Image (cartoon, helix red, strand yellow):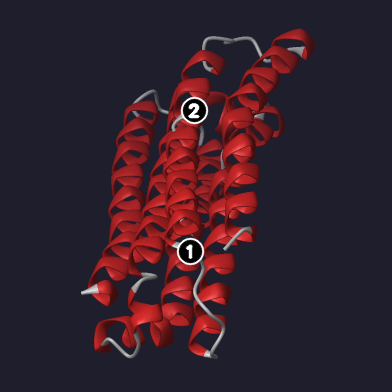
Amino acid sequence: MAGLQALILLIVIPAIAWAVALLVLQSARAELARESAPESAQERSKARILVHLGYSGTPVLLGLVLYVLARPGLDAIDRGASGGVVRLEPLVLWASFAYAVASCSTLAAQTWIVKSRLRAFLGSEFGRVLPLWVVPATGVIFALILVFLVLAYVDSVLGGVPVGSDSAASGAISSFQAFALGTVAFPVAAGFSNRMRDLNQRGFVRAILIMEVGELPVLVGLVQTFLALGSL
């Protein structure tokens, strides 16, 4: 059961979110194309959209890597290899859940930014839209680091290290829940940032500052979860 849950949370949910993002951007690009842009602009449009689609698929790829690395621990949990390992199932589940939520939040924020600023993204202001697009990606990177720490802990338990107390595990689970909730700030920040339509020097600074403010809850959740995992 743990293996199936991890598969859904680490791979299936991010893949669905990515597919939805592709459909949304494809629809927005088709609508923009009806304005009959020049051929050279269309070619540049295709190249930049492909770059975006490739990089936005990173959560799916990283989720696949995490799932492969987690298989030994997941198999041990499903077999009930030992009482200590089985007790780690809720921790692994919530760590995977946090990764799934972070992936969805990142993809939602990035898609909203590109869709709202599609003309600028495909035009001369690409260099100003890209930094706004990059900020939400830190949510997936932070989630990746935290899941790696959990997998390392599971491996150590499989190697004979005693399992931490139930209170410490409960604190770590609560921290993962807080981290997952914090990543929702990215789409919210993207919505406010998109209101800055003019990406001149002052407008760009305001837009990027709003995105950075949206990252603060994620950083708080990261530190909290890191400290909680250290107490296991």
Splitting the image into 4 quarters, where does residue 105 fall? top left
Question: Is the residue 115 above or below the residue 203 in the image?
Answer: below
Circle 1 residue = 165
* Residue 162 visible in this rendered orientation of the protein: yes
Secondary element at tag 2: helix
* Residue 37 visible in this rendered orientation of the protein: no
Rendered location of residue 191, percent (x, y):
46, 18
Q: Which mark is residue 185?
A: 2
- Tell whether 101 sits left or right of 23: right
- Residue located 33% across and 58% down the image: 15
Query: Which kind of residue does numbered mark 2 sit on?
Result: Ala
Image quarter where the C terminus lies is bottom right
- N-terminal of the two: label 1 or label 2? 1
Rendered location of residue 31, percent (x, y):
32, 28
Question: Is the residue 116 above or below the residue 51 in the image?
Answer: above
Query: Of tags 1 and 2, which is closer to the observer?
Result: 1
In this view, the residue in front, 18 or 171, is 171
**Within-10-Å neighbours for mark 1: few <14, some 14–19, many 20+:** few
Q: How many marks?
A: 2
Q: Label 1 to label 2, Cα distance in Å?
A: 32 Å
Task: Name the outermost residue toward the right.
Answer: 201
Task: Name the outermost residue toward the left.
Answer: 1
In this view, the residue in front, 190 or 151, is 151
